[in-house]
Amino acid sequence: MPQGIRLAPIAGIFFILGTCELTRAQARLDSPAAAMKPSGTDQNALAESELQTGIELTRGGHFAEAIAHLLEAQGRVSNDYAAEFNLALCYVGTGQFQKAISVLIGLREHGRENASVENLLAQAYAGDGQEGQAFEALRRATASTPKNEKLYLFVGGAFLGREEPAQSLRVIELGLQHLPESARLHYERGYLLAMLDDFDGARMDFERAAQIAPGSEIGYLAKAQESLFGGNLAEAIRVARTATAQGKQDYQLLAILGEALIRVGASPGQVEFAEARDALEKSVAARPNYASSQIALGHVDLLDGRLKAAIEHLETGRRLSPQNLAVYSLLAAAYRKSGQPGQAEAMLGILAKLNQEQAQRIRTAPGDSKPIPGASGASRGEQKPQAERMKNYRGSENRFKRI
């Protein structure tokens, strides 16, 4: 079965690695004024300023840059909760899950336990592979805010980031019990079911999402993904073009458009190839941390002979989605063509290791998943046991088969 494009990072943790603010901070430290010992009042003012800078960077998704400022503010500001929570958020956003867990447990121990803390803690545990702790934190968060759609999207996304679609599905299904008319949750479940080889169930969810939110970005996304998974590339292209023509410049729709055009055979020199490049470049500009766009654009550059750019985008995609199998074969090709056989062999070595790990997961997959309190496990009726679903789970290498 043809595969859809990689799901967006629904964990809500969108980060852009950069150095501008860190460079400014270093410049301040190296300046003569910084060498002078400030008064207590000045120190407090500086800490408050660092906190505000860290918060603004966090809001902008610049998590890596924000960490240094938040660490400077930690324990020295009037609103230490804001410093701690934003620091934990940045740790999750940069994949430093154990550090995030430590900070969040500290907040809980100091009486700061709330739905936001539990939500972020569930994401951190999921990202760190601590499934039981993640679902326990999710249970606590759900008890306080059962109608919070983002709660389920964030935690489900954290599991998917570890290539655990079955666990992500459990989270999304729990959300649909509380929010049965959520177009976004239906869309996410459709994607996950398709990845677990239940395309009939996926089609129902994609169509339901489009019915709930007709003419919206999520509605168009559902239609485009359904077509992409079903192998109807012409329809996926038509839907994505229609959406973008109506001003819906969603980075996922743009990625689907570019991806589908490449799948149907667009090649350098063709108008469709230029259209694919334009769509993917816009997608990357809108959401630099979306692995699908980075990898797809890297593939386009590889086809176009732009080897340096291809390697840059593919390495970014690998950093964002290190379990994605396809990126390693593409990197191997790019490195080989650029005259770096050692790097090419290294990529193939990682690919072989990941393939072995995935085969081991499939062999040792348990039977039916143990449900969490309130989760249906199968909202539409009987589902395949988890072991059978995992045997059919093709993994991300086929989601990016064309790239």
Image (cartoon, rainbow, N blue to C red):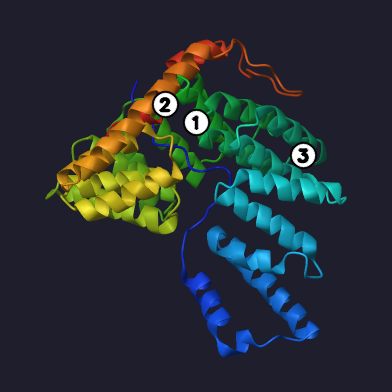
The disc placed on residue 312 is none
Query: Is there a contact, CB below 8 Å, between mark 2 and mark 3?
Result: no
Residue in the image at 40% along x and 53% along y: 246
> Quarter-wise, where is residue 5 in the image?
top left
Gap in Å between the C-alphas at discs 3 and 1?
23 Å
Determine the secondary structure under disc 3.
Answer: helix
* Disc 2 packing (10 Å; few <14; some 14–19; many ≥20): many
Check disc 1 and report the residue beneath it: 163
Residue at mark 2:
395
Q: Nearer the viewer, residue 80 or 340?
A: 340
* Count of all numbered marks drawn on residues in the image: 3
Q: Is residue 31 above or below residue 180?
A: below
Q: Secondary structure at mark 2?
A: loop
Q: Closest to the observer: 173 or 15? A: 15
Callout 3 crowding tier (Cα within 10 Å): few <14, some 14–19, many ≥20? many
Residue 133 appears at what percent x and percent y?
A: 72, 32
- The mark that comes first in sequence, 3 or 1, is 3
Q: Which kind of residue does numbered mark 3 sit on?
A: Ala
Q: Residues within 10 Å of mark 1 (few under 14, many from 20)?
A: some
Query: From the viewer's perspective, is the residue at label 3 or at label 1 nearer?
Result: 1
Q: Position of residue 226 (x, y in %)?
A: 42, 30
Q: Is residue 57 above or below residue 162?
A: below
Relative to 31, is 44 on the left or the right? right
For the point 45% across and 25% down, which residue is it? 195
The kind of residue tagged 2 is Gly
Q: Nearer the viewer, residue 359 or 218?
A: 359
Residue 385: % across, % down: 57, 10
Q: In the drawing, what numbered circle is on residue 141?
A: 3
The vertical placement of 33 against 171, above or below, is: below
Percent coordinates x, y for residue 241 in the rendering: 33, 46
